[in-house]
Amino acid sequence: MMKILKMFYKEDELVVTPTRYPKPISQVAENMTVITYKEIEEMNAHTLTDVLNTIPGIQMDIRGGPGSATTARIQGSEFRHVLVMIDGVTVNNLSDSYADISAIPVQIIERIEIIKGPASSSWGSSLGGIINIITKPAGNTKKIEGTVSASYGERDTGDYRAEVSGKVGNFGYYIYGGNLLTNGFRPATDFYENNLYTKLRWDMTDRVSLIFTFGYNKGNRGILEDPNFDILQRNNFEYLFSTLSLNYAITDEADFELSLRTSRRNTEFFLNQLSTGAELGVITTDEKNNGASAKLTWRHGKHSLILGADFDSGELKSDAITGGKQDLEKWAVYANDTIVVNRFTFTPGIRHDHTSTNGDFTSPSLGITYKVDEKTLLRAYVTRGFSIPPLSSTFGTGFFFVPNPNLYMEKVWSVQAGIESTALNYLWLRTNLFRHEISDAIDTEQLPDGTFTAVNKGKQRRQGLEIELKTVPVYNTSLIGGFAFIDAKDRDTGERLLNVPRYTYDIGIQYNDKSFKVLLKGHYIWWNADPSFNGKYSSFIWDLNLIKKVYTTDKKTVELFLTAHNIFNGSQYTVDVFKNPRRWIEAGARLKF
């Protein structure tokens, strides 16, 4: 019986995001979701957007096919409150804290660790939560392994990928290259991107290793076509990031890690007149970030103590920024401990952040887990968190916008509690309650001369619950369910906040007999959008994924796959100029060796 139940409740699974060091997920007090590469593969996903759209508690505004610009909210937060990282490098830009998740290919992902709610005591600016992308490791055997896949769908949608990994002597490697393109399923939603990623590992000794990563993608996309205002908007982008990490096992109980990181982002936004094609304006940004982190870990008896420091220096050049250039420098020190006492685990943590633009902030946290028995785990977590105002709010310029260099950080006190259990036979169930008290929320205010500026004036309360469940397979078939409810109000007026998702439903059925896999999932979200947006979200969006193994040996596997998106032509969008795609179909083949 326990063998079956542990299919869902994997207490020995190690995660790194909560305290920045691997520990069993049964010791994690935060509301956390982990998505593995196997689950990603079963979705036939293209980019990170496709994956996040399946997770209860995360709200996505899908605006087109693969690669279309979109944002992620966690428990009703603003997109700027969600920290997205890959290999420890921040994906959010400096301008408006936008993370281009639709440009991140999924093939390089080993797993995604998501914390729903503030994660500031470990990571700094992350009032809404964190999405931490952990890439596939460099090979650890001499055997060369890899995957080659290709898919093609309607509107000339193609996704072509190849990866290989292995080890030569003390050097392990992982190399990936891919191309994603589509003509788009709504006006001005075409997308084209080439991407490259590599990870190299050198085991210098039994205790010392160096890891180097490099990622690059370049592409262009359509963003908006609005006949009412006779405008067309497009975007060119080029992203690069790289890391170098030294890992040293000082003793059996102590580890030291030093990591360096750098990233570059170049973007161009074009605004044209739709009817004539005349250029109305161009905004270019050139962003670079350099950073370093140091971390010391000490494990002894009941304790796993982490001491660390982060430093980042960012520079944003843009014709939409005061003076054409602004810098953001940050440094932080943090400490946390995981203390295991019988069935209890205590996780105290604290972090102090300094910024060159918006002052200092200290983020304490305390988490507790209690293992009731082999089937049930209780979690509770309280923390203080923050998000740094984006540079576009502090220093941005425009025809009708005035910068406000006196903005404060947005702040939150958060309390969460939950239960995860397999006490009901053949059913895994997780429930989480949350309450976020937000102050100094940034909003837009009109000045007497008719211009606008960003101000700290909001006090908000976001509270609700999430429920997730999955059944044990019966005749290779499992049922999947999820529900999230968010009550978001202005604490001063008591009015419900518009454009904050009110509730979502996720329903699915999964079949897997090892040679044939079927995944049917339906997603429904009530956006509670401003009526003037002319949104429409009264339908479930159903996607069907099929995977069939057609050839298998000890060394090779060939699979065919097919995905039917939005099979019932449902509508689910908040703004009428950003409608979701109608039904479309794609198919492909995958070779593993």
Image (cartoon, grey):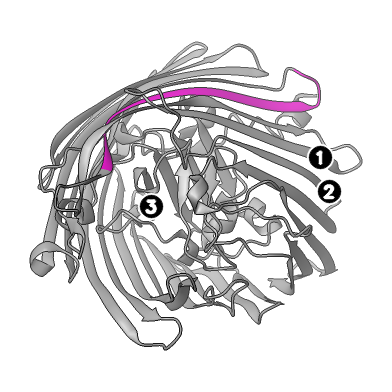
Q: Nearer the viewer, residue 452 or 43?
A: 452
**Label located before the other in sequence (3 or 2):** 3
Q: Position of residue 458 (x, y in %)?
A: 28, 32
Q: Nearer the viewer, residue 341 or 550?
A: 550
Q: Are marks 1 and 2 in contact (CB under 8 Å)?
A: yes
Q: Nearer the viewer, residue 152 or 259?
A: 152
Q: Amino acid at mark 3?
A: Met
Majority secondary structure of magenta residues: strand
Q: Secondary structure at mark 2?
A: strand
Magenta stretch encompasses residue 435? yes
Residue depicted at 76% across the width and 43% down the height: 508
Q: Badge 2 is on which residue?
A: 511
Q: Of the numbered discs in the image, which one, if any, rests on residue 478?
A: 1
In the rendered image, is residue 307 in sight? no
Q: Secondary structure at mark 1?
A: strand
Q: Nearer the viewer, residue 117 or 10?
A: 117
Q: Badge 3 is on which residue?
A: 85
Q: Position of residue 455 (x, y in %)?
A: 20, 41
Real-space CA distance between mark 1 and mark 2, rounded to the nearest whole angstrom: 6 Å
What span is colored magenta in the figure? 424-443
Q: Residues within 10 Å of mark 3 (few under 14, many from 20)?
A: some
